[in-house]
Image (spheres, helix red, strand yellow):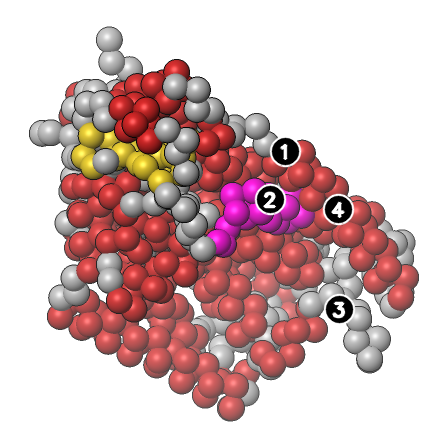
Amino acid sequence: MSAIYALFTSPDAAQRAVRLLHAAGIGDDRITVVTGEPFEEHDFARRDRATWMWYIAAAGGFAGLAFAAWLARLTELAWPLPTGNMPIVAWWPNLIIMFELTMLGGILATVVTLLVTAKLPSKRAGIYDPAVMDGNILIGIENPPDVATVERALSGGDITRL
Amino acid sequence: MSEPTARTISDDLLRPLLRTSWRFYLLVAFLGGIVLTGLCTWIYQMWMGFGMTGINNPIFWAFYITNFVFWIGISHAGTLISAILRLVNAGWRRPVTRCAEVITVFALMIGAMFPIIHLGRPWLFFWLVPYPNQRMIWPNFRSPLVWDFFAINTYLTGSVLFLLLPMIPDFALVRDRTIGLRSRIYGALALGWKGTPKQWHRLESAMSIMAIAIIPVAVSVHTVVSFDFSMAPVPMWHSTMFGPYFVAGAIFSGIAALIIAMAALRKFLHLEAYLHPVHFQNLGKLLLMMSLLWAYFVFAERLTIWYGNDTAEVAVLNVTQQGSFAPLYWTMVVCNFVLPLFILSQKRLRTIAGCVIAACGVCVGMWLERFLIVVPSLGHKFLPYAWGHYRPRPVELVITISTFAAMTLLYTLFSKFVPIISIWELKVGGHDVHETPLARSEHAVGELRP
């Protein structure tokens, strides 16, 4: 794999470089952006926002709810303990179990979705430079089609390394 | 005062991880010694039997259950407060959240141990776990103790994940700043984190969802703990207000614990540039608000019982306010209400030292509150001939003291191996405005600037 990347000290310079790459006909899918912190206020960091995570979390919650209802009912019927004049399948106390497992299902589904969609854990493949952790912003292209054009786009101001 | 750069923030907050002084080892040895003593005492109690404690008919719940309720309450410091501050996007939360979330995890772990210690035969604790077994012994889902199992484990799981997820980018930072074995360990913990926009968006979405989910779970946990008491027909326990009363008390003691932890971190890890006086002032105002709320609940509870004039309940009321428990009761009132009100309502006293003094008072007061909920009611149930007394024995005292040492030890070790302030979140805090921290004042609560 060949790659070209630049480390920018300011997000504005990184944004300019991304715009120049776009102008050179290179799409977002080919541009690698790596930062040490999220830059929500800049366009280069706003891509890939769409996610099903909220729906998956809700589905996980429903799964937890269904499991809790099944577990509580099954347990109470399997070993019927008359307690305090309550019915054997007592839904008031079961609601507590159902609530807790609903939330647990939602939380676990969220974490699993995060790990899957963010590709964690993974070996760090692709372009990376530890300098991003000091506040630099990495903009790069893997297997650039036209090296000179990409170099021109990336060699703007506020650059620490190309 | 200039804004710290990304590199300065990393350097400052990684310093405790990369340099170790002899004081750290001394502190760990001291605290470890106390924890070890507590463990030996617990083994001694198991060996000799539960008769080594002061627990006896009719007072079957005492120090251990007091500690259980107290530590579960302390656990509300972190995840709940952090989740609320995240959801309202409070700018001043950034240096506070991780300090708080860590308290939750460790306090829950310590709190959850006490029912096991209290079992007397702790090796049978798994009987609470709902799983099919060959003896056909199933837990009773109508028992509040089983609700505890589910509530505490859900909150513990959620809190651990809520703490761990934002630590991944910081682990990546440590991975890139270190070499050798340390770099490999932190590299494994970082899970191959790079910092692409997609990873950041997913992390922030996950944190938002978990913040929403964890708030009702936190409220439910202490409500369920209160159900351990209020589901029983015992004087002054069988009350509909116990749920919110316990939750308010838990948040109250949690904030107090957070203030103490932050002050210690600021002092010993030299984090003055990140934990500003305004953070303590804000938390001090929250503590004052919770003190007033706590006093409101106590008043509402006491007035209702006094006015109702039920013989059994008034007996408990009197023994706490005028009888043998009165010194503890009035100490609790001073610590939980008078002291915070006096210190925190005055701006000139709402300093870091003032907040810490008030917070220490609240921790003492809230422990006493838990004790006064548990013991006097059990000692003064409906029939006077069955009344009894309780006096803690040395094993209970040693185990109680050792859990405070365990909390401090775990917190010390955590702050040694993990950045105690979320570095990437702190850096994000510098993006939105270009004012100095002094001018910004980190969004002081309740003080609008023109």
What amino acid does circle 1 point to?
A: Trp
Report the residue that reaches farthest toward the bottom: B48
Residue picked out by circle 1: A52
Q: Would residue B37 appear left or right of B384 to someone viewing this image?
A: left
Tell me the CA gap for discs 2 and 3.
Answer: 27 Å
Q: Is residue A86 visible?
A: no
Q: Are marks 4 and 2 in contact (CB under 8 Å)?
A: no
Q: Is residue A114 found inside the magenta-colored segment of the image? A: yes
Rendered view: A7 above or below A17: below
Residue B408 image position (x, y, % from top left): 31, 63
Residue picked out by circle 3: B131
Residue picked out by circle 4: A63
Tell me the CA gap for discs 4 and 3.
Answer: 19 Å
The nearer-to-camera label among 3 and 1 is 1
The nearer-to-camera label among 1 and 4 is 1
Magenta stretch, residue numbers? A104-122
**Quadrant the N terminus of chain B occupies:** top left
Secondary structure under badge 3?
loop
Tell me the CA gap for discs 4 and 2.
Answer: 15 Å
What amino acid does circle 2 point to?
A: Thr
What amino acid does circle 4 point to?
A: Ala
What amino acid does circle 3 point to?
A: Tyr
Residue B195 image position (x, y, % from top left): 39, 41
Q: Are marks 1 and 2 in contact (CB under 8 Å)?
A: yes
Residue B346 image position (x, y, % from top left): 22, 29
- Observer-nearest residue: B219 or B188? B188
Secondary structure under badge 4?
helix
Rendered view: B39 above or below A91: below
Q: Are marks 2 and 3 in contact (CB under 8 Å)?
A: no
